[in-house]
Image (cartoon, grey):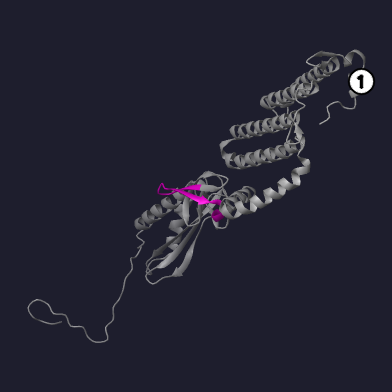
Amino acid sequence: MNTTLNSTSFWEQGLLGEKLVLNITAGAIAKAVLILIIGLLIAKLLRRYLLNLSRSTKYVWVINEDTALTLHNLIVVIAVVYSLDALGVLSYEIAGTSISNLLTAFLVFYFSYLLAKKSKDYMIMSSPREKLPEVQIKAKLFYYLIVTLAFFIALNIAGFTGRLTTLLAAAGITGIVLGFSAQTVVSNFISGIFMYFDKPLKIGDPVEVAGYSGIVHDIRILSTRIRTWDGILVRIPNEKLFNSEIKNLQKYPARRVDITIGIAYKEDTQRAIDVIRKTLDEMPYVLAEPEPTVFVDSLGDNSVNIAIRAWAPSEKWFDVRTQIVQRVKKVLDEAGIEIPFPQRVNWFAEELRVRVEGGQQK
């Protein structure tokens, strides 16, 4: 790396070319001091600008006091490195590149890592709980993107650009080898990203998926955890989750309650329908729109089956369903409408004789 910026002759002319300490010229010392002053000035101005911007921007998760301090320290340290390089202290070469290049590359990567990590943590901590799963995935994607870009920028600063093709080829071969051994992990990771964009569920939703039913407990980049209705925690890999049919029982604000109840054939079906409809109208959580419907659904083996279709708020669906069953049973009993139990009539081809006490047959 040439840090002289085409001004080597100027820094070696006249008094600037005189050697003072350890064969370091006055021009080298002056240039080092100038680089340090400019670096400190730029760092201070940039920090002040970012602090002012953080008070008005909506992207406060990345533009904040921590970001301003991190960039300030990065510029100061890089200025110190370039100052030492101007003095010739870091002019030694390692692996075909100077120490100053290696230090600068390391600093860029390290401070970029800090910036990405702090931004990820700040984004997660400042997000509301209901949006936490979506924010976690977004924060991790941002973190990995910044770290990857910083890695390649650091390689370029270190002077390894000419060797980048070889490194990428080696990385490709390594990736193929690791892909076969960790394809499940990669598949779950990619499925997690697709789930983020598809958004079929979120934490707290009641769902039926992959043969399980319960509440979504946690959503991670590789797996999703569901707490079943009987209190068991089930971990489902995102690949299996993404390829399964997902029933989100609370995705929409209203959900329909479907109940079928049978009455005896001797009963008046219209009277039973009127009694049931009146009961539904008296229930506060049964929605008036869409209007509940009650109708004769089918003629069963032992009863006339009446279907009840009523809409309720999704979060109250289970409570409304249990109340409808309980109240309909009660009002039908009070109205004297029979709810029959299964009955069977047995016919015999020949007359059936039964022996009773006393030896007589009937």
Q: Nearer the viewer, residue 299 or 79?
A: 79
Res. 163 image quadrant: top right
Q: Nearer the viewer, residue 155 or 149?
A: 155
* Amino acid type, callout 1: Phe
Decide: is 274 above or below 76. below
* Part of the protein shown in magenta: 225-241
Res. 35 image quadrant: top right
The reply to whether the magenta stretch includes residue 238 is: yes
Please give the name of the residue rendered at 57% of the width and 39% of the height, measured from the top-left corner. Answer: 130
Residue 275 % position (x, y): 43, 57
Q: Mark 1 packing: few (<14 Cα in 10 Å), some, or many (20+)?
A: few
Q: Nearer the viewer, residue 7 or 329?
A: 7
Residue 54 % position (x, y): 71, 26
The reply to whether the magenta stretch includes residue 288 is: no
Instruction: Look at the image and tell me in which quarter the C terminus lies.
Output: bottom left
Give the side of residue 243 with respect to residue 361, left or right: right
Circle 1 sits in a helix, a strand or a loop, which is it?
Answer: helix
Q: Is residue 49 something that shows in the picture?
A: no
Task: Return the residue at label 1.
Answer: 10
Q: Is residue 188 something that shows in the picture?
A: yes
Residue 141 % position (x, y): 65, 42
